[in-house]
Image (cartoon, grey):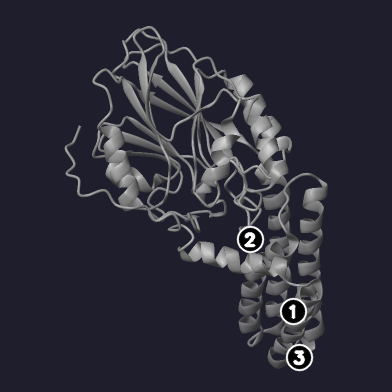
């Protein structure tokens, strides 16, 4: 283990995530939920009138058609959002979501108006085509893709295991973000039964940000967690403090049989000479504090730890963790961006490390990091959709270097 000199223990900043610009934007859009219906309706009408005026200035013959296309697209978005909770797909508030969905439509409007200055037919064609494509993308991203839960696999060599020992199968879940129990959570249980892992680990964010203090959601997530079992146990850590409110989230695990690791080193003897040591700690997103906490945790790793596995909600500790003797680091938080652009990847990851660790596997200095795309959706005014980024669970297989090839 690398000797990391420690200064005096820092004090955590529990509001560090709320201080980031992204959280502020989400809260601002969510504030429209608190405004009167007439005020939001008037805001929409004023916006539609301004769009009509812009078309009149740039391409007067297209003012009615261009405005009608935009209004129709927004009304379709509103209808889709209204239907989602009725169909038990997702349960976000309509007004903030509708405003967020309008942002790409307004960008398309701007590009189309620029084109229409040179060719009004091409401008209108681009506008109509992209608005239609947007409606298709929204339907797919909100209705279809969030329920296309995948089981990813990760195979790793574990030189600490005897060469002829059977592999250890660890199922990793992250970012459940339960609003109300849906078909997606039922599919999670089906995949657990099909995968038949030796142990299960969950890396935080159990409730949706809009429902993290909702009594019905709290009761439902606890009922759901009670159904998760594995032969060698189920282990969990808490996620982002604004999501997993510490005074509430710790109670999710009462009478579930799940072991919550707050700042713990948990050795497991799985037989046949296979030892796995889990390191679990809370995530504050205050890196100075969390690095210090991890240093203290790493100092407690036993000499006979076997394969060491860190459970921490976010990938943000990876530049620090790789200085220690950690074989595997499992996390989530980024949702893989949730909305990805082909060839570029995540637009936003909500992590201080940006796109450096946005999703999947990373190998650095002997540590393998796996960043899960997660299972659920964030909440507040964050888009209730996934695009080119389906939800996932990950089955990690640890083998001796000449280990058993059995599935």
Percent x, y of residue 20: 45, 63
Query: Which element type, helix, strand or loop, lies under badge 1?
Result: helix
**CB within 8 Å, label 2 to label 3:** no
Query: Which element type, helix, strand or loop, lies under badge 2?
Result: loop
Percent x, y of residue 232: 49, 16
Judge depth for marks 2 and 3 and give the one in front: 2
**In the rendered image, the vertical position of residue 392 relative to residue 354, given as above or below:** above
**CB within 8 Å, label 1 to label 3:** no
Percent x, y of residue 75: 81, 67
What residue would you read off at disc 3?
60
Checking the image for residue 381, the label placed there is: 2
Query: Which element type, helix, strand or loop, lies under badge 3?
Result: helix
What residue would you read off at disc 1?
43
**Quadrant assignment, res 37:** bottom right
Of residue 9 and residue 94, the one placed in the foreground of this image is 9
Tell me the CA gap for discs 1 and 3.
Answer: 24 Å
Task: Identify the residue at image location x=69%, y=37%.
Answer: 219
Task: Identify the residue at image location x=42%, y=15%.
Answer: 167
Q: Is residue 158 left or right of residue 112?
A: left
Tell me the CA gap for discs 2 and 1.
Answer: 18 Å
For disc 3, the neighbor class at 10 Å (few under 14, some 14 to 19, many from 20) is some
Tell me the CA gap for discs 2 and 3.
Answer: 35 Å
For disc 1, the neighbor class at 10 Å (few under 14, some 14 to 19, many from 20) is few
Q: Is residue 38 left or right of residue 263?
A: right
Where the N terminus falls, by quadrant? top left
Q: Earlier in the sequence, mark 2 or mark 1?
A: 1
Judge depth for marks 1 and 3 and give the one in front: 1
For disc 2, the neighbor class at 10 Å (few under 14, some 14 to 19, many from 20) is many
Of residue 316 and residue 237, the one placed in the foreground of this image is 237
Percent x, y of residue 195: 57, 21
Q: Earlier in the sequence, mark 1 or mark 3?
A: 1
């Amino acid at each position: 283990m690398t000797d990391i000199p420690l200064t005096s223990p820092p004090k955590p900043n529990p509001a560090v995530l709320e201080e980031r610009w992204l959280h502020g934007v989400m809260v601002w859009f969510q504030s429209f939920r608190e405004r009167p219906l007439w005020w939001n309706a008037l805001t929409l009408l004023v916006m539609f009138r301004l769009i009509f005026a812009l078309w009149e200035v740039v391409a007067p013959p297209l003012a009615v058609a261009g405005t009608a296309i935009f209004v129709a697209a927004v009304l379709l978005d509103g209808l889709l959002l209204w239907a989602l909770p009725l169909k038990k797909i997702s349960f976000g508030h309509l007004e903030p979501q509708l405003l967020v969905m309008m942002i790409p439509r307004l960008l398309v409007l701007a590009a189309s108006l620029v084109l229409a200055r040179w060719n009004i037919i091409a401008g209108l064609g681009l506008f109509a085509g992209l608005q239609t494509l947007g409606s298709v993308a929204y339907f797919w991203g909100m209705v279809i893709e969030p329920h296309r839960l995948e089981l990813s696999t990760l195979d790793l060599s574990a030189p600490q295991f005897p060469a002829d020992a059977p592999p250890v199968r660890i199922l990793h879940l992250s970012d459940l973000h339960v609003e109300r129990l849906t078909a997606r959570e039922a599919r999670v249980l089906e995949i657990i039964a099909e995968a038949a892992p030796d142990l299960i680990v969950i890396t935080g964010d159990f409730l949706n940000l809009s429902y993290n203090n909702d009594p019905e959601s709290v009761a439902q997530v606890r009922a759901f967690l009670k159904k998760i079992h594995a032969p060698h146990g189920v282990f969990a850590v808490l996620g982002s403090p604004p999501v997993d409110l510490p005074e509430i989230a710790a109670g999710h695990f009462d009478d579930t049989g799940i072991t919550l690791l707050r700042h713990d080193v948990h050795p497991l003897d799985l037989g046949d000479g296979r030892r796995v040591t889990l390191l679990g700690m809370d995530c504050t997103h205050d890196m100075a504090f969390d690095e210090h906490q991890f240093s203290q945790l790493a100092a407690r790793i036993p000499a006979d730890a076997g394969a060491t596995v860190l459970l921490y909600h976010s990938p943000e500790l990876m530049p620090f963790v790789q200085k220690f003797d950690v074989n595997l680091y499992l996390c989530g938080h980024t949702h893989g961006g949730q909305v990805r652009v082909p060839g570029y990847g995540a637009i936003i990851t909500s992590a201080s490390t940006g796109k450096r660790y946005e999703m999947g596997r990373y190998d650095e200095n002997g540590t393998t990091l796996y960043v899960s795309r997660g299972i659920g959706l964030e909440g507040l005014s964050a888009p209730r959709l996934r695009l080119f980024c389906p939800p996932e669970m990950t089955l990690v297989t640890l083998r001796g270097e000449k280990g058993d090839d059995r599935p």
